[in-house]
Amino acid sequence: MTSANTDLLKWLNECLARGHSSASLTATALQSGWNADVVRATVAEAVGRELIANRAVVRTPGGSLPEPDMTQSPTFIQTTDRRVEILTVVKHPRVVVFGNLLSDEECESLIELAQPKLARSQTVDNQTGGEEVNSARTSDGMFFTRSENPVCERVERRLAELLNWPFENGEGLQVLRYRTGAQYVPHYDYFDPAQPGTAKIVQRGGQRVATVVMYLRTPDRGGATVFPDIGLEVQPVKGSGVFFSYDRPHPDTKTLHGGTPVTLGEKYVATKWLRESEFI
């Protein structure tokens, strides 16, 4: 690391210790003329060092999170192109089950577009920041890039509007197929700050702060999304979806969740993860 980068890292460490967010520090450094690649790499290193050394519980900047407007306890939210129903609401953790989130045509189109690329699902390798096949996840899956096709872009922009979160802060949609017997054991979606691979992962847009699981095909039996810490079970009904957010990478968020085994038929889902800053 050059002396200039060392100075940047020192400044970042001092600012993080005073409670400034990684997103605000990145913006400040870029505005000051630092090279974008250098800034992202150095911010990731600073955040990784702080989290691993202190096991810090870092909340999102200013407590800001993706969130549908629930101020009037609505039974539906009208987006630009769709009337989305509010079926279930949990306050802690914040969980909202949406009905009519996707049309039948959108569900079938996403399945059709995903089919040629489906392969054994992988999970994040916390040691390296890459991906690996994991026995805990027995589905087949693939990733679209953000806005890869008109259907993806339409759904992604609807979610951005519905959840009041920037379109650019979203990862591309992931489509998963769960055959009979397939499942995903309970897990967290945030990146564990204690793992050495996290510093590399968060370079692309910071921590994950929310998840939307959308159901594209209803199995005949099984396949519910479960939240063991709060005793919630969401049935995988085509066109509906479940949203949940987490303001820090810690089990206290009570966002442990999993997909129970499909016992008859097939389940297809599309998952959207939202980051704290622009996902690149």
Image: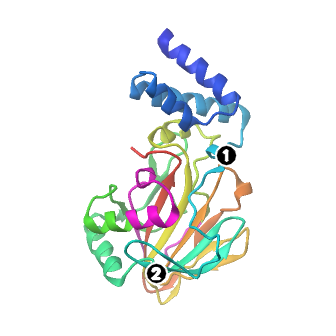
Magenta-colored span = 157-185
Residue denoted by label 1: 59
Mark 1 is on which residue type? Arg
**Image depth: mark 2 or mark 1 in front:** 1
**Mark 2 residue crowding within 10 angstroms, few (<14) / some (14–19) / many (20+):** some
| Quadrant in which the C terminus appears | top left
Q: Residue furthest bottom?
A: 220
Q: Residue at x 37, y 68 (%)?
A: 155
Task: Identify the coloring.
Answer: rainbow
Q: Residue at x 66, y 63 (%)?
A: 256
Q: Residue furthest front?
A: 72
Q: How many marks?
A: 2
Residues at marks 2 and 1 touching, judged by CB atoms closer than 8 Å? no
Residue denoted by label 2: 180
Mark 2 is on which residue type? Thr
161 part of magenta stretch: yes
Who is closer to the viewer here, 272 or 24? 24
Asked if residue 216 is positioned above or below residue 71 in the image, the reply reads: below
Q: Is residue 176 left or right of residue 71?
A: left
Q: Is residue 229 left or right of residue 172?
A: right
| Quarter of the view holding residue 108 | bottom left
